[in-house]
Image (cartoon, helix red, strand yellow):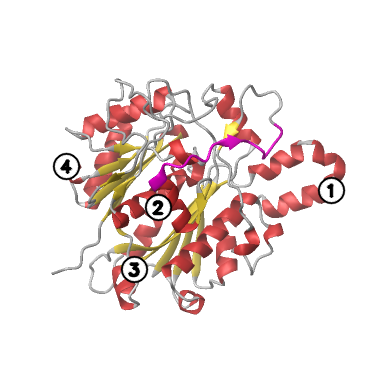
Amino acid sequence: MYDNDQRPRQVVITGLGLVTSIGLGVEEFLDGLRAGRSGAKPITAFDTTGFAHSQGCEVTDFRPADWISTVDPDDLGRATQFSVAAAAMAVADARISPQELRARRALVSVGTTDAESRDLDVLAGEQLDEGPEQLTRQTVRRAHASRLSSSIARELGLVDVEVLTIPTACAAGNYAIGSGYDAIRSGDVEVALCGGADAVCRKTFAGFYRLGTIAPEVCQPFDRERKGILTGEGAGILMMESLESAQARGARIYAEVLGYGLNCDAHHPVAPDRDSLARCMTLAHRNAGITAQDVDFISAHGTGTKANDVTETGAIRQVFDVPPPTVSIKSMVGHSMGAASALGSAACALAISEGFIPPTINHTETDPDCGLDCVPNDARRADLSVVQNNALAFAGNNAVLVLGRHREAS
């Protein structure tokens, strides 16, 4: 239900928290996007013996204690450390005091693919010999997926709060942001901290490797010679609030959340469905009150696999008579699973506020079966009004988010 005057609230993004392989925080992430920085490096999270290739996009130089002070970082799994740190960054970036935040009704919604599967990797490895009882107790404490969101509430001291963890795999970040949009728009909450988080783990790497979708060196979305994904990790948390709230406290606004679309075709466990994704984009446009012609660029799911890129570009062509520039930041940060679309949404918000389109790096020659302008290798200046962020996930979970430049009423 809406608030007393029955008009849905406008929802804006006022803070960004980023933990990525190309930088921590807004400034480093923005610099990485503009420069086309690559986060690819040899994986160190687990023993890669037996894999013919093992490049990934791990987060380095991350010190949890720099951002986590209330909760003991050692009591959190790595993905939860990422989500809590990103939430703290988003709050700091939004320039809202902890006291003011705690006085508001809030939602914390975090999407994930693996939650704390990395801890299960530890239990399955040689470290069991060093003390299985202690490791088991620690894993039981840390492994609950709910901790990705509840630990944010604990760290920030939120009391009038609803916490959600959304497990819709690689589309979960957009799902979480959509839940925050609905809650603020309807007047159910005043502020929302939403996004996604995941950590590199053996289970997911090995699963994609067995599917033959891990690239040997780099991720090359839409390229004729693309060979697959690089698994990545990190977190993206967006601080969202009503326009009235943001204006009342003089907050900087990165972008407005115009709407989103969700669907689940359940067509295949791992293969995307072109028609279903096209329908999801149309649902998002309708919910946002725009047409396809209004979209200035698309942040694609863009995994760099043969099947995904052709299917996604085919769906785009079903919806757009002339597709706008379409990029994949996974070429830089890898596929960070549940964090992927949250990082894509943050990139879209920065693109709008800073006036540029991030590049698709590692690009040599566009696959004619894709045939889109993927802004190869170098960022492009652009005056952006409306941006679309695509997310696809296993089991046919699709989520498309639409952001726009907020323009003050004249």
Please name whichever residue, 60 or 16, is drawn nearer the observer in this view of the structure.
60
Q: Residue 409's quadrant in the figure?
A: bottom left
Describe residue 163's horizontal placement relative to residue 3 as left or right: right
Marks 1, 2: nearer the viewer: 2
How far, Cα to Cα, is label 3 from label 4?
Answer: 28 Å
Q: Secondary structure at mark 2?
A: helix
Spot occupied by residue 204 in the image (x, y as percentages of width and height): 59, 34
How far, Cα to Cα, is label 3 from label 1?
Answer: 49 Å
Q: Secondary structure at mark 4?
A: helix
- Please tell me which of labels 2 and 3 falls first in the chain: 3
Q: Dot 3: few (<14), some (14–19), or many (≥20) neighbours within 10 Å?
A: some
Q: Secondary structure at mark 3?
A: loop
Spot occupied by residue 274 in the image (x, y as percentages of width and height): 32, 28
Q: Dot 4: few (<14), some (14–19), or many (≥20) neighbours within 10 Å?
A: few
Q: Tell whether position 315 is magenta.
A: no
User: What residue did someone put label 2 on?
Assistant: 346
User: What residue did someone put label 1 on?
Assistant: 133
Q: On the rendered image, what quadrant is the N terminus found in?
A: bottom left
